[in-house]
Image (tube, rainbow, N blue to C red):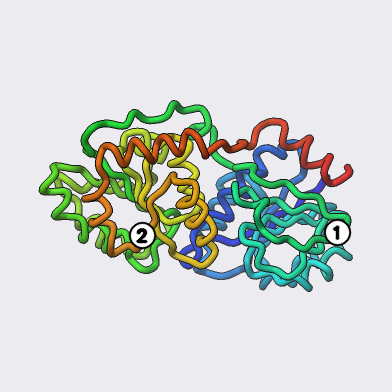
Amino acid sequence: MKILIYANGGEKIGLGHIMRCLRLAFYLKGCDISFASDDKKWLSHGHELIKNAGFKLYKIPNHQALASLDAQILLIDSYDVRADFFTYIKKFFYKVVCIDDECELKFYDVDLIINPNPYASTLPYKLSPRTKTLFGLLFLRTEFIKAKKITINKNIKNIFLTLGGSDDKNLSYFIAKSIQNYLLSRNVILHIAIAKAFKYKKELLGLESSFIKCYENAPMAELMLGCDVGVCACGQTVYEFLSLGVPIISFVLASNQKNLALFGVHQGYLIFTRPENIAMELEKMSFETRLNLRANINQNFCPIFIDENFKSLFFTLLGL
């Protein structure tokens, strides 16, 4: 079965769509899988990830060009595709699948919609009668699924800051500078992940000291397991921290992260704030606060993780 996956990732939008599609592709092994992505220079880091994973990549002008590519199944993971495009493109493929997060389209004319978020079932999707749904299945890597949760220590000694695959606004630098006094006064070490698509790598590396450590090609699970508090945007990284039982201070970088922020606060398993208020939230992050966050994680974060059964489920839902 030939499957074509359309996704973009790079400096301006991060690498989350690419990473989860690669994870999905891993569990569809045995199929003839290729990727398509817009041919733009600022998306080169996403292209590199796809090629390094061993998949064929078609660089196309935009998603309209998908109609010229050959496959039985088209899977789209992009916020740039409008509702009418799904109706148009289904004429060229036997089955069309959409990975979605926020239910922003008025109508989803697809054969299968996948929303991995735990709040997916609360969204008001308008679907075609033929559309099947797969909600709440998280595409986390094995190291996050199998690891034991961290121990909540009485004192905070290590904080892990990660903004995912890109940081165009240099927020990692801003946050690190804003909490320097906290780090010094409490003898706390801040660990910062730097991804390939970071524009301000040099500025971040210039902050390195005895209490600020930077990591390129960061061992994410290892750093998360070694921290007492995680600081991140409300994207896929939140689920990685939660799977390891790490108390989180989070913030929103884009409109598509608001649902997770609101849901996480409602479930009581993260602190939501603005980047400029992170130092204040750290000051309030007592042992009791972290214990309460952990208790809520244990009680309310009960995800279903992608596994070797996904391929069978995927084709069953598509009627194949």
Q: Nearer the viewer, residue 282 or 197?
A: 282
**Dot 1 crowding, Cα within 10 Å, few <14, some 14–19, many 20+:** some
Q: Is 154 on the left or on the right of 273, as rendered?
A: left
Q: Residue at x 62, y 61 (%)?
A: 102
**Residue 134, which numbered label?**
none
**Residue 202 seen:** no
Q: Which residue is mark 1?
A: 93
Q: Is 271 on the left or on the right of 264, as rendered?
A: left
Question: Number of marks in the image?
Answer: 2
**Residue 273, which numbered label?**
2
The local secondary structure at tag 1 comes to loop
- The residue mark sitting in front, 2 or 1, is 2
Q: Is residue 313 above or below residue 194?
A: above
Looking at this view, name the residue that lies furthest to the left. Answer: 185
**Residue 42 seen:** yes
Q: Residue at x 37, y 46 (%)?
A: 248
Quarter of the image with the C terminus in it: top right
**Dot 2 crowding, Cα within 10 Å, few <14, some 14–19, many 20+:** some
- Choose top left, top right, bottom left or bottom right for residue 85: bottom right
Residue 186 in the image, given as x and y percentages of width and height: 14, 44
Residue 216 in the image, given as x and y percentages of width and height: 35, 48
